[in-house]
Amino acid sequence: MPRHHKNLNRLFIDADLRVGKSFKLDMAQNNYLLNVMRKKEGDQIILFNGRDGAFLAEIAEAHRKGSTIAVIQAHAKQTPTSDLWYMFAPLKSGRLDYMVQKATEMGVGHLQPVITQHTQLVGSLKIDKIRANVIEAAEQCEILSVPKVHDQVSLVKLIEQWPTEHAGRKLVFADEGAPVDGAAPSLMEIKDQPIALLVGPEGGFSADERKLLLDQEFCVPISLGPRILRADTAAVAALAIIQSNIGDLR
């Protein structure tokens, strides 16, 4: 996508967008524009909603109780949703935020939290917070196809449901026991098939979980190299391997 108006702030709006439409911002977005970004009446921004493309818009009326935004020009056509799934064991808050943002930047189309035996989850997983981090990353990186965030599922249930929910899709998983030089050849064998990537928790998969994964015909183990990586670092490394070997970075 050409980077016209690259200096303008981008704002995700969960509403239909078209030239000529006007609407009021909610309190959170209004506060962000007026108080955080110091925008005023007449300033322009880029709006997108993940389905209609991007539009140039103007603050037609700035008011602390709710500003009015007017859509004035089409900016970019909607891009198709990526078919790459990223499945991950949730991490502690700050590192989970980082991982979700980087996965969005790396071109993931679906985010699936997976609960494993070694997952260290304090309280319930906040799906809404994950979605907010996805949107923030999309706003900052000019991404128009906002990844979908799915509800958490256990690893056992994920594997049980795979033939029905993900028929024909290969599950590539980061395996500490895989040969260090075995990543690229394994991936090249499945380069024309739908892909999901699974990265486990700190401490890795349990012995039973690793056996469960290796026993499935649809699972492909890959190595992330000779070093032990933190789970959030492993996410970026694994996505880079996927995208550079068989994805859109080829």
Image: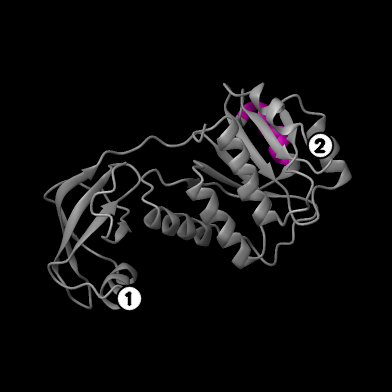
Quarter of the picture containing the N terminus is: top left
Taking the image as shown, residue 111 lies to the left or right of residue 64, namely right
Q: Amino acid at mark 2?
A: Ala
Residue at image point 48% right, 59% down: 133
Q: Which residues are magenta?
A: 157-164
Q: Amino acid at mark 1?
A: Val
Above or below, comparing residue 93 to residue 134 in the picture: below
Name the mark nearer the viewer: 1 or 2: 2
Coordinates of residue 136 in the picture (x, y in percent)? 42, 59
Taking the image as shown, residue 24 lies to the left or right of residue 229, namely left
Coordinates of residue 151 in the picture (x, y in percent)? 58, 49
Residue at image point 28% right, 42% down: 52
Label 1 Cα crowd, 10 Å radius (few <14 / some 14-19 / many 20+) = few
For mark 2, give the secondary structure. loop
Taking the image as shown, residue 137 lies to the left or right of residue 12, namely right
For mark 1, give the secondary structure. helix
Q: Secondary structure of the magenta portion, mostly?
A: helix
Above or below, comparing residue 74 to residue 213 in the picture: below
Magenta span includes 158: yes
Pointer 1 residue: 36
Residue 113 appearing in the image: no
Asked if the residues shown at circle 1 and circle 2 are in contact, with their CB atoms under 8 angstroms apart, the answer is no
Residue 248 appearing in the image: yes
Q: Nearer the viewer, residue 145 or 127?
A: 145
Residue at image point 70% right, 62% down: 121
